[in-house]
Amino acid sequence: MQNLSVRIFPDPILQKQSKEVDNIDEKIVKLTKSMIETMKDSDGVGLSAPQVGILKRIFVCRDFSDEDKETFLILINPTIIDYQGRVESKEGCLSIPGFYEYIYRYEKINMKALDINGEEQNFHSDGQQSIVFQHEFDHLNGILFPERMTQIKKEIFLKRINKAFK
Ligand code: CO
């Protein structure tokens, strides 16, 4: 097990663009296992590779279709195929611990990604699953959830977190 630590705002790596994975080797398999453990230890529902300092297009998250909270999804090189609707979502982030705010997301989202075996999979999602997919996907593009707020809300929120994570 790799010991991973979650990068906290304003770590500049959180705003960087991640690169596509070109080969799902043993190292990637190990990384995703460690990411799932780190996410569980932190009581999170999703975690992206850049949040643990690795700029690769990978994220893990809970599979919300499993009510026992025991199943996890691994998405590698995800792309958004289509989306629909708009919902308000109260979000937090393991990289901005202790802060929550309402933002808008798509209600439903359809993603395509490689699974851990390198097989292309389609992920149709709504509800919490859809929100987590969008939140984690944003991380791969260096976007933190305050970027999804209206300008005024964002300024207030950034002031608060800049003060908290000096
Ligand atoms: Co996050």
Image (tube, grey):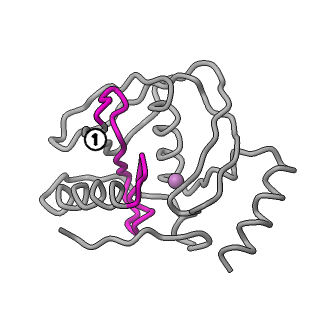
- Would residue 4 be found to the left or right of residue 89 on screen? left
- Residue at the right extreme, as displayed: 152
Circle 1 is placed at which residue position?
72
- Would residue 124 be found to the left or right of residue 29 on screen? right
Q: Residue at x 35, y 51 (%)?
A: 58
Instruction: Say few, some or many: other residues with alpha carbon within 10 Å of mark 1 (under 14 / 14 to 19 / 20 or more).
Output: some
- Would residue 60 be found to the left or right of residue 161 on screen? left
Within 8 Å of ligand 1, the CB of disc 1? Answer: no
Q: Quadrant of residue 97?
A: bottom right
Label 1: state its secondary structure.
Answer: strand
- Residue at the front extreme, as displayed: 68
Please name the amino acid that badge 1 sits on. Phe
Image quadrant occupied by the C terminus? bottom right
Image quadrant occupied by the N terminus? bottom left
Image x and y of residue 107, in percent = 58, 23
- Residue at the top extreme, as displayed: 84
Q: Nearer the viewer, residue 47 or 112?
A: 47
Image x and y of residue 42, in percent = 40, 60
Q: Residue at x 34, y 60 (%)?
A: 41
Q: Does 51 lie within the magenta span?
A: yes
Q: Nearer the viewer, residue 54 or 95?
A: 95
Stretch of the chain drawn in magenta: 42-68
Q: Nearer the viewer, residue 117 or 155?
A: 155
Q: How many marks?
A: 1
Image x and y of residue 71, in percent = 25, 38
Above or below residue 94? Residue 70 is above
Q: Does 20 lie within the magenta span?
A: no
- Residue at the left extreme, as displayed: 26
Q: Residue at x 17, y 63 (%)?
A: 27
Q: Residue at x 30, y 58 (%)?
A: 35
Image x and y of residue 100, in percent = 65, 51
